[in-house]
């Protein structure tokens, strides 16, 4: 009853069993009762229908090859060659899906032992093909942050454009002169400020994965629209423009507020596309609902996002405005033309505010970032170390058909675009020894392209270097500057003791390095025991603890975190809501920033809501050390048990500066002599002796700071493990002694500021990294149900108004 074309025994899995599967080819004039298709025979020879050509339009003609795949990339199904030019997939119910077509004449199928590769013969040419199936990612692909600026509510910043307010005449609170601005490493953004209009324009050039390759997003968070005029308008806008040749395409998102003659406000959300220098303007506009307008004018935080999809010859753009409370409005997509497929040339973000009244209209800017979707995503499914089977084939797969962290990084290095790597909880221990190799095949994990690694928190997701080498090496080559992002991960057990590069025990980075919700502990190196950062560095809600710089070959420097300039790109570093404690070195055991004395004051670092304590310099150094690096220290606590608390110096050709705000410093001495620079001291700082020169309004010097010992403290959000800090004791002079005009909106633990810490009926900010709670909750500060209940209550009552 037909001609058998192929046969296979079942794989002994539920649904398929161990029956014999036979492909039959039956001519139209053949025996009745039998059709072309696949039949199954049991041990007695009884035949039953499994999948017939007449039952599915994807399965016509006779099957000329059968093969069962292993469970894995190909799903454990039965595959068959049909129609002489296609391969279909058949599940255990006999249902058919077309898998591959237009492949010539397929005559036979087989799978590799690891289940990752399908082999088939194209009999017309006698070619043997190997097909590796790329499974869909089992994690949702997020956004890769190309550039971010955390405004943090400061009134002025050396890592500008961290501006607080915009007025009719442009920016207020800026420390930058008109026409100047910062540049950023990695993807370099040079801001130019137009004084008369207040417009901020920036040029963004891509290094490894230009934004023109696909979609991207520009997003900012804002709040506090103040003193609206009774008549006129005010707008918050941001956008991007593309230029290559005579034409330019500009896309802009804008929220506009207007007031009618009765003084009633309305608002709309729009996307505007224009062909420049002259050409039509296209607008997509949606009115904002009255509750949203009312909330925004009342100062509620809102987020404005411009989403741009450049996946084809033309693109789509839409804007989204979302209240912190969750109310969201989006515009319809607007089609715009792509003038060029070249590199993304210009990034412009302008928050233009105008009105007919002279009274300033102010808007607090809390965050600004440029993102683009990850090109691919890998979910690590094993804690075992192993190299990738074939880097660049799109599979994160070791020879054991598992996705290890090392294999995921090797794939990321070999594939274009940014890669997301999601780590499962557990300890991912490096076990493949080897030094001076930069392909992530042995020793440390070398990052050669943009990578974001996300874990479930540093208390459960751990990467252990096992003392074989450092743990992460970002941009091993001098000209390689990929971006590495680590979130929710602990890095430990790194040891950089190779004579050729004994730097960065936990992480050594030449390219941009962004750390969030992390722990860097128990690492060793000659230089930079915990972290040696490059020119672009950002750390938020992290603990850098118990790392050591060891004199393997030269003087041991930088026990905890050391940011060093390399080449002509200036340092841009920021440290927020973190603890750098109990690290050891001969010099610079805590936090250090070292710029080039011959490059003026272009190297800059911002430190806020951070504790530096218990870092031990066995020969010389300080908890906090700046050399030729302009630094701003805000609402931070520096405690030097051994040695000094703060050291700052500059060379003869450098114009580096130092600014200290609402901070606490102690040590022996608290500050080393400022022999080569004069710090900016605006009052409201505290020191245990008189070495810092804190003698301005609100300053406290030569007093007992009355701090509790360094201890773990629970946090509300972000950092999933406890942070480390000193809490002012009841009655400490630090309580409610800060400058309210410069008070940050929350402290190191993400608890709100200010709090009525002395129970006098008025809530004022405290000096240092920790805002003490109200007296009735002191018993539950660090641990315990009472303390956690209090912290959570505080976080829900207006705590995140500045998020």
Image (tube, grey):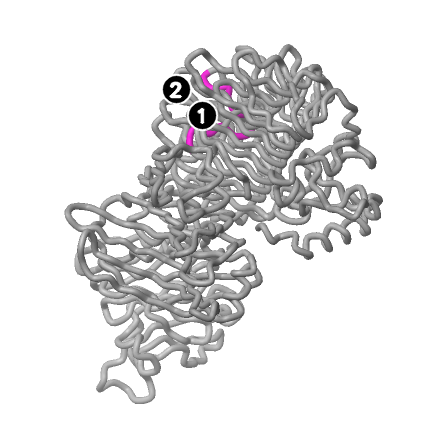
Front residue of 341/79: it is 341
Front residue of 484/221: it is 221
Q: Secondary structure at mark 2?
A: helix
**For the view shown, which residue lies furthest in the bottom direction?**
32
Quarter placement of the N terminus: bottom left
Q: Secondary structure at mark 1?
A: loop
Per the rendered image, the range of residues in magenta is 500-511
Q: Quadrant of residue 682?
A: top right
Estimate the x, y position of residue 684 in percent, counting from the top left.
Answer: 66, 30
Magenta stretch: residue 503 in it?
yes
Q: Residue at x 46, y 61 (%)?
A: 321
Q: Residue at x 29, y 48 (%)?
A: 212
**Which residue bears the numbered disc 2?**
599
- Answer above or below: position of 321 versus 748: below
**For the view shown, which residue lies furthest in the left direction?**
246
Q: Verify CB contact (< 8 Å) between mark 2 and mark 1.
A: yes
Estimate the x, y position of residue 56 in percent, counting from the top left.
Answer: 33, 79
Point out which mark residue 368 bears: none
Point out which mark residue 603 bears: 1
Estimate the x, y position of residue 449 in percent, counting from the top left.
Answer: 38, 38
Q: With 583 as the anchor, is 348 left or right in this view?
A: left
Front residue of 106/401: it is 401
Q: Residue at x 47, y 28 (%)?
A: 604
Q: With 324 as the anchor, is 785 left or right in this view?
A: right
């Amino acid at each position: 009853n037909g001609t058998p074309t192929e046969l296979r025994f079942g794989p002994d899995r539920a649904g398929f069993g161990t029956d014999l599967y036979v492909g039959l080819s039956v001519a139209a004039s053949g025996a009745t009762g039998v059709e072309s298709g696949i039949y199954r025979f049991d041990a007695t020879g009884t035949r039953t229908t499994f999948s017939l050509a007449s039952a599915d339009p994807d399965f016509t003609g006779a099957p000329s090859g059968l093969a069962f795949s292993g469970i894995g990339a190909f799903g454990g199904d039965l595959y068959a060659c049909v129609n002489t030019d296609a391969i279909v997939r058949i599940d255990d119910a006999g249902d058919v899906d077309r898998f591959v077509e237009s492949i010539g004449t397929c005559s036979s199928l087989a799978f590799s032992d690891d289940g990752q590769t399908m082999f088939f013969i194209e009999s017309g040419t006698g070619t043997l093909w190997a097909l590796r199936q790329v499974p869909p990612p089992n994690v949702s692909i997020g956004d890769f942050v190309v550039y971010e600026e955390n405004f943090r509510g400061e009134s002025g910043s050396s890592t500008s454009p961290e501006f607080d307010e915009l007025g009719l005449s442009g920016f207020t609170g800026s420390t930058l002169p008109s026409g100047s601005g910062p540049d950023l490493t990695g993807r370099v953004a040079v801001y130019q400020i137009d004084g008369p209009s207040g417009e901020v324009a920036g040029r963004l050039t891509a290094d490894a994965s230009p934004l023109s390759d696909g979609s991207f997003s520009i997003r900012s968070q804002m709040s506090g629209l103040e003193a609206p005029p009774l008549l006129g308008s005010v707008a918050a806008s941001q956008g991007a423009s593309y230029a290559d040749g005579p034409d330019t395409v500009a896309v802009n998102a804008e929220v506009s507020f207007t007031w009618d003659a009765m003084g009633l406000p309305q608002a709309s959300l729009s996307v505007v596309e224009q062909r420049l220098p002259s050409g039509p303007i296209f607008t997509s506009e949606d009115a904002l609902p009255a509750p949203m307008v009312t909330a925004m004018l009342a100062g509620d935080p809102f987020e404005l996002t411009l989403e741009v999809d450049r996946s084809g010859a033309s693109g789509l753009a839409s804007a989204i405005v979302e209240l912190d409370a969750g109310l969201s409005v989006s515009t319809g997509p607007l089609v715009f033309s792509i003038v060029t497929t070249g590199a993304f040339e210009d990034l412009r973000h302008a928050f233009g505010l105008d009105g007919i009244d002279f009274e300033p209209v102010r808007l607090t800017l809390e965050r600004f970032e440029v993102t683009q979707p990850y090109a691919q995503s890998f979910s690590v499914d094993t804690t075992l170390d192993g190299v990738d089977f074939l880097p660049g084939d799109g599979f994160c797969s070791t020879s054991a058909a598992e996705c290890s962290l090392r294999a995921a990084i090797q794939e990321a290095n070999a594939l274009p675009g940014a890669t997301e790597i999601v780590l499962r909880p557990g300890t991912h221990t490096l076990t493949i020894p080897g030094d001076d190799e930069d392909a992530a095949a042995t020793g440390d994990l070398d990052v050669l392209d943009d990578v974001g690694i996300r874990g479930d928190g540093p208390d459960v997701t751990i990467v252990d270097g096992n003392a074989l080498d450092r743990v992460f090496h970002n941009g091993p080559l001098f000209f390689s500057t990929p971006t590495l992002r680590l979130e929710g991960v602990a890095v430990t057990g790194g040891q950089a003791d190779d004579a050729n590069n004994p730097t960065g025990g936990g992480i050594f980075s030449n390219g941009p390095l962004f750390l969030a919700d992390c722990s860097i502990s128990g690492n060793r190196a000659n230089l930079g025991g915990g972290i040696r950062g490059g020119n672009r560095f950002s750390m938020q809600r992290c603990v850098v603890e118990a790392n050591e710089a060891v004199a393997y070959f030269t003087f041991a420097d930088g026990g905890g975190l050391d940011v060093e300039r390399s080449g002509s790109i200036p340092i841009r570093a920021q440290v927020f809501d973190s603890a750098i404690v109990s690290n050891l070195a001969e010099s610079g055991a805590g936090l250090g920033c070292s710029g080039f004395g011959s490059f003026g004051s272009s190297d800059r670092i911002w430190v806020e809501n951070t504790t530096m304590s218990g870092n031990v310099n066995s020969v010389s150094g300080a908890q906090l050390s700046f050399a030729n690096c302009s630094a701003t220290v805000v609402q931070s606590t520096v405690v030097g048990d051994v040695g000094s608390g703060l050291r700052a110096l500059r060379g003869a050709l450098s114009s580096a500066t130092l600014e200290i705000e609402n901070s606490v410093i102690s040590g022996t001495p608290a500050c080393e002599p400022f022999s080569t620079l004069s710090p900016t001291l605006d009052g409201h700082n505290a020191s245990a002796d008189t070495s810092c020169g804190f003698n301005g309004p609100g300053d406290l010097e030569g007093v007992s700071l009355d701090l509790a010992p360094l201890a773990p403290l629970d946090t509300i959000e972000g950092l999933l493990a406890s942070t480390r800090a000193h809490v002012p004791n009841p009655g400490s002079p630090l309580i409610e002694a800060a400058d309210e005009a410069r008070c940050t909106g929350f402290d190191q633990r993400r608890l709100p500021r200010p709090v009525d810490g002395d129970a006098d009926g008025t809530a004022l900010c405290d000096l240092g990294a920790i805002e003490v709670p109200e007296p009735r909750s002191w018993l539950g500060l660090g641990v315990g149900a009472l303390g956690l209940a209090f912290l959570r209550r505080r976080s829900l009552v207006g705590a995140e108004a500045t998020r």
